[in-house]
Image (spheres, rainbow, N blue to C red):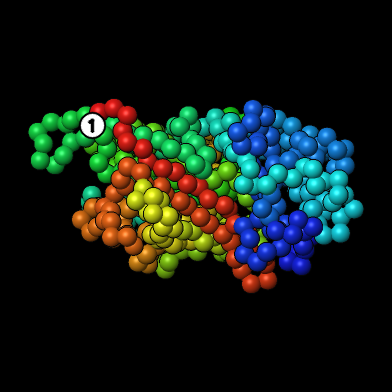
Amino acid sequence: MNQTHDPALRSWVTSANVPNADFPIQNLPFAVLRRAGTDERFRPAVAIGDHALDLRALHATGIAPSEGLEACLDDTLNRLMGEGARVWSALRADLSALLAEGSEHAPALQSCLIALGDVEYRVPAHIGDYTDFYTSIHHATNIGRLFRPDNPLLPNYRWVPIGYHGRSSSIGVSGQTFPRPCGQLKPPDAERPEVGPCRRLDYELEIGIFIGPGNALGDPVDIDDAESHVFGLCLLNDWSARDIQAWEYQPLGPFLSKSFATTISPWIVTMEALEPFRSPWERDTGEPGALPYLSSARNSAAGAIDMQLEVLLQSAAMRDSDVAPQSLSRSNFTDAYWTVAQMVAHHTVNGCNLRPGDLFGSGTMSGNQEGSQGALIEITRGGVAPITLGNGEERTFLQDGDTVILRAHCEREGAVRIGFGEAGGTVLPASSA
């Protein structure tokens, strides 16, 4: 905690001072953007209220110290991500001071601001590798009950942070559209598989974890050093073709059922901004403790993050009638069975080398209460219990034209609420059969 977290801090960008704004001065998340509809180069920026501060333009003014800001001259955040926590913190402190109420530089910086309504985004980093974890025990149990009623949770789950290697080429930023995936399906009553459009398309409410400095090949990251390798968090929707997945996942896990699209929010909230919202990492009574390489006093005391999550759906008919998206579920990142630090420590325990800009998905964040399920397959119990939307439409799985929106924020007494913006994506009709 430092002066950037001061709840009394206010900005000369007045929209940042509005109660419950996603981007107050205590947040300052990073994205890569440009003015919409132009051929400008994309550039790094931080959000402040309803504006973005163009960091390349800021550098050109010569006002701010160059450390950290020099790394923001590219069209991705990879160089900044690789600089490490000391540089990130120094840059954040400089930006906070420049944007704070009373800053002598406010008039000169007005020209560096771009209204958020006037920008378009791109994926903020070159993502070399993408790993999707499976860290909600409630989601794993709910899914297991559908496929293995007598043995819903496999015995390794409580010991191993389960993950699989995903496809980085199909990761897109909020606003992504994609055709309904096609693939091999085998209906229960069919003698042989068929090829066609997915019929059981689903979303997954997840947290994205962007890696900062990497580690050398063969050099595991200690759990107490793990978060120094994490730049920040975003929202992530790991779209899933459940019928393709059911046929293909044994013996090696997801493949074409996951690789067709993944949507992330454009803004990355830094780990430093999340400090006021730390929570103990706890497990229910009777659950085993983690193995030594996944255990530390620091992780137990404050390894979890109190982040409130929400999924909303807007059908094409709702959109045409100007009906607002409907909330489907709410959960919390504290529902994760494993922490961010444990995911990093486990990913590298075999010597795997991470690199700046690598992305982790947390896995679907479901709670253990009704209304906290992070995927339709859980909400509809595998498609046998349809939900009814406010306009009378029913859903078991997603239909063409559906838009799914993820939102998140952190809120706690004694701290200023910060938000993550949105990760929205829309399903288009299949392009082939």
Q: Quadrant of the N terminus?
A: bottom right
Question: Residue at the right extreme?
Answer: 104
Mark 1: few/some/many CA within 10 Å (<14, 14-19, 20+): some
Q: Quadrant of residue 303?
A: bottom right
Residue 323 pos. (x, y %): 41, 57
Q: Quadrant of residue 259?
A: top left
Residue 256 pos. (x, y %): 34, 32
Q: Secondary structure at mark 1?
A: strand
Horizontal side, residue 62 vs residue 116: left or right: right
Instruction: Name the one closer to the observer, 364 or 46.
Output: 46
Q: Which residue is mark 1?
A: 196
- The residue under label 1 is which amino acid type? Gly
Q: Residue at x 31, y 33 (%)?
A: 430
Residue 111 pos. (x, y %): 79, 43
Question: Residue at the bottom extreme?
Answer: 413
Q: Residue at x 70, y 30 (%)?
A: 74
On the question of residue 27 being in view, the answer is: no
Horizontal side, residue 179 vs residue 49: left or right: left
Q: Residue at x 39, y 50 (%)?
A: 320
Q: Quadrant of the C terminus?
A: top left
Instruction: Name the one closer to the observer, 176 or 220.
Output: 176
Q: Is residue 13 above or below residue 202?
A: below
Question: Residue at the front extreme?
Answer: 321
Instruction: Name the one closer to the observer, 113 or 238.
Output: 113
Instruction: Name the one closer to the observer, 223 or 96.
Output: 96
Horizontal side, residue 197 vs residue 366: left or right: left
The number of callouts visible is: 1
On the question of residue 44 being in view, the answer is: yes
Q: Residue at x 43, y 55 (%)?
A: 322
Residue 409 pos. (x, y %): 56, 59
